[in-house]
Image: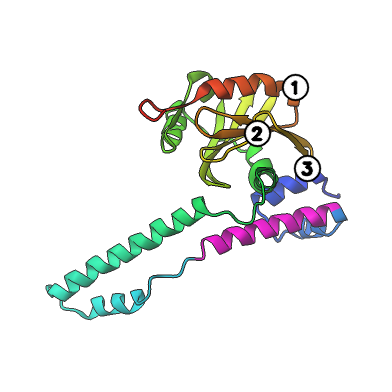
Amino acid sequence: MSMNFSEFKRLLGADPRNEDPEFRRACQSSPEFEQEALDAALFEEKLERAVALPEPAGLVEELLLISQQPAASPRRSRLLKFALAASLFVAVGAAGIVWKMNPGWDSVEDYLVDHYRHDGVSLLTRTDEVSTADVQNILAELDIQASPALADIVGVIKYCPTPDGKGVHMILNTGSGPVTVFYMPDTEVKDRQTLAFDDVEAVLVELQSGSAAIIGPNAEEFSSLQALIYDSLLPLPGNS
């Protein structure tokens, strides 16, 4: 049985390198499927290049020296501190690159299409157990908070890259089905600008702090969601 395009995009978003024979055949079944698979592969390559961070010069050699020093040696203690600092540099540096990179997005519109095609479809089917505390804790890392009206309908929430740094990817459980929201704390947008691609539509919202994109198949509901998100994603006290 041939795979339909919606199922193909869901599987592609969840695992672009899936080696299942039926999935691989689907990748080459039509120009539309081939282009979708190519776009996903290019996105994965961009992410991999962004986190391909080399270890600090001499780190391996210094670690070998540590192992050869007597346990009570002052040099061993000094080298151990260096190694810990270097390890922290790698960990923090890699995380920073993930959030601060711009892997070739020429515009916010390009980013929305690229990001949504990468994992937007697959996250719509994920069933997380998200508490309002989880929502607030994640948003607090970006110096914002959500009103109870918004926090109560968040079904999935995770950090994600944006064109200008670290952001948040949310799935809202609305009355007409799940809707995707990207929160972009440092990205300027044209308020109420719309964009249609694949089988969804997107609208950009300028917020008191940063901006957001609402993405879903039912644009009729966007007006009420724009108002909810504008009124609900607010700077933490002291950060306005």
Which residue bears the numbered disc 2?
190
User: Between 162 and 151, which is closer to the camera in this rendering?
Assistant: 162
User: Which of the 4 image quadrants contains residue 150?
Assistant: top right
- Is residue 206 toward the left or the right of residue 195 in the image? left
Residue 212 on image: x %, y %: 59, 33
Q: Which of the marked residues, 1 or 2, is nearer the chain's N terminus?
A: 2
The type of residue carrying mark 1 is Glu
The type of residue carrying mark 3 is Ser
**Tags 3 and 2 in contact by the CB under 8 Å rule?**
no
Graded by Cα atoms within 10 Å as few (under 14), some (14 to 19) or many (20 or more), the crowding at tag 2 reads few
- Is residue 12 toward the left or the right of residue 144 in the image? right
Mark 3 falls on what kind of element?
helix
- Residue 6: image tag: 3
Q: Let me know if residue 87 is in the magenta part.
A: no
Give the residues drawn in magenta, as a range: 32-52
The type of residue carrying mark 2 is Lys
User: Between 202 and 87, which is closer to the camera in this rendering?
Assistant: 202
Task: State whether residue 229 is above or below residue 56.
Answer: above
Which residue bears the numbered disc 1?
220
